[in-house]
Amino acid sequence: MEPTAALLERAKHGDEEAYRALYGAYRPAVLRLARSFARLDSDEVEDVIQETFVRAFRALKGLQQTAAFERWLLAIARNRAVTLDARKEQARRSVEQMAGEVPSQAPALPPALALERESAVVRELVEEMSEGPEKETVRLFYVDGALSAREIAERMGVGKSAITMRLERFRAKVKRELLRRVLAVQVE
Amino acid sequence: MERHLDDAAIRALEAKDGQAVAHFRDHLSRPCAQCEQYLANAPARLWWLEAEADRLLHIHGALAMPAANDTTGFRAVRRAMRARRMRKALVATLAGAAAIAAALVIAFAVPRGGARPEYTGVKGQESGLLELSAVVVSRAGVTSPVGPGGRARPGDTLVLRYRADQPGPAYLLKAGPDGQPQVLGQFALSAGTHDLSDSGGVAGVSLEGEQGEVRLWLVQALRPLTAEGALDAVRHPSGATGTPVVGFSVRVASGEN
């Protein structure tokens, strides 16, 4: 497959095939992200996908760091998903800072994260967890990856919110580990 | 008391405070419910951390999935992009023009000499106050203010707004390649501040294919005025015709210039 950077350059000039290739390459990731929000139904998941790509493609010319495209795209997707999720939950959590906004630029990433390319980090963090429903939820969603959060909720017989919270708690662990790695590089 | 992540700690880490960095490098190497709770609701400024976590969690996971061959979904994206581009261009043209009064420099705020005939004591005397300002609308639908002599790009559209104290017909003229004015069209002005428009809506002057200075004039007919009379009014800036004339110019240059 053509490198993402080359596709982005072509897409910035309106190349239809480049748009199509980027959509094909990154739709699964956006889909996965949207499916981690258990309260979103399949229509809303599709809304997240469509809105994410529409916003990203329209703002593509302003993206200076093409290397940051993945993070930028996923930030747009998360904003959209959080917005829909919060609307559904009567603004359970404030989305004022994020709602509907497309980050204007992806900031330069600390070197430690720029080098972070191993999915082993995720597996290690999963393995560190105590056995139980939380670990099982995380394993089903982030390791096996076949089920949506909504489907996991149905299979485990728990509420959708509970599954979303378990996944969010695991994401917080990932964020902790990523932040630690950034700090480790700063001290060295 | 052990220090945990909070807004102050994040600010210290962003400032590369040595003590904070050393503390949290060690502290975050172990699970901490309090810090993870903070990170679970991380402030918007840490969106890069959110995005990196998502990249790690979802991009890698998605690699195991086949590339999407979702033609229907892709078509929906493209349809939505096209629809929004058209809507944005329309809204930008209309709303942008409507917003300029408060934001823009008024070009040639004082009519040219002779545009205000001397007061004769006759009630209802024409005063001929006429002002002109503009915004440029890019191909992408982005609206930005432009002052007299300001810069625009080829392909932009110039949207004009006028202020007049008398209603009446007016001619819009543009300098041709030879520098001589040419009539672009006729418009009905209303008293007050308005976008220059005709029955088709807000009028825009396309700068497609233009290069260098583009000069425009608005000539108001306070008494019967032919197109030739409007041309005369522009050709004789001394105001000998006594007809209100305002001009506006922009310099068109591509980004590289």
Image: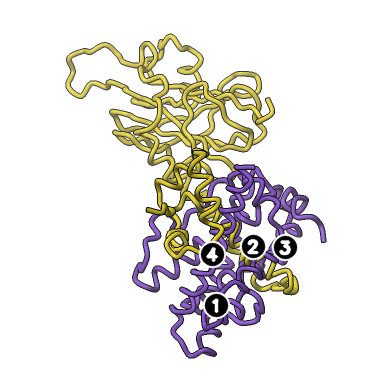
Residue found at the far front of this picture: B1
Chain for disc number 3: A
Report whether A83 appears left or right of A60: left
**Percent x, y of residue A141:** 60, 77
Would you call the spot at circle 4 few (<14 residues within 10 Å), some (14-19), or many (20 or more)? many
Task: Label 1, secondary structure: give it.
Answer: loop
Q: Earlier in the sequence, mark 4 or mark 1?
A: 1
Chain for disc number 1: A
Task: Label 3, secondary structure: give it.
Answer: helix
Task: Label 4, secondary structure: give it.
Answer: helix
Chain for disc number 2: B
**Percent x, y of residue B108:** 41, 19
**Looking at the colours in the rendered structure, which chain would you say is drawn in yellow?**
B
Closer mark to the observer between disc 2 and disc 4: 4
Does residue B11 lie above or below A145 as drawn?
A: above
Kindly identify which residue carries mark 4. Answer: A173
Kindly identify which residue carries mark 2. Answer: B56
- The amino acid marked with disc number 2 is Leu
Q: Earlier in the sequence, mark 3 or mark 4?
A: 3
**Percent x, y of residue B217:** 48, 24
Q: How far is the residue under mark 2 from the one under mark 3?
A: 23 Å
Does residue B246 lie above or below A54 as drawn?
A: above
Q: Colour of chain A?
A: purple
Q: How far is the residue under mark 3 from the one under mark 4?
A: 34 Å
Kindly identify which residue carries mark 3. Answer: A20
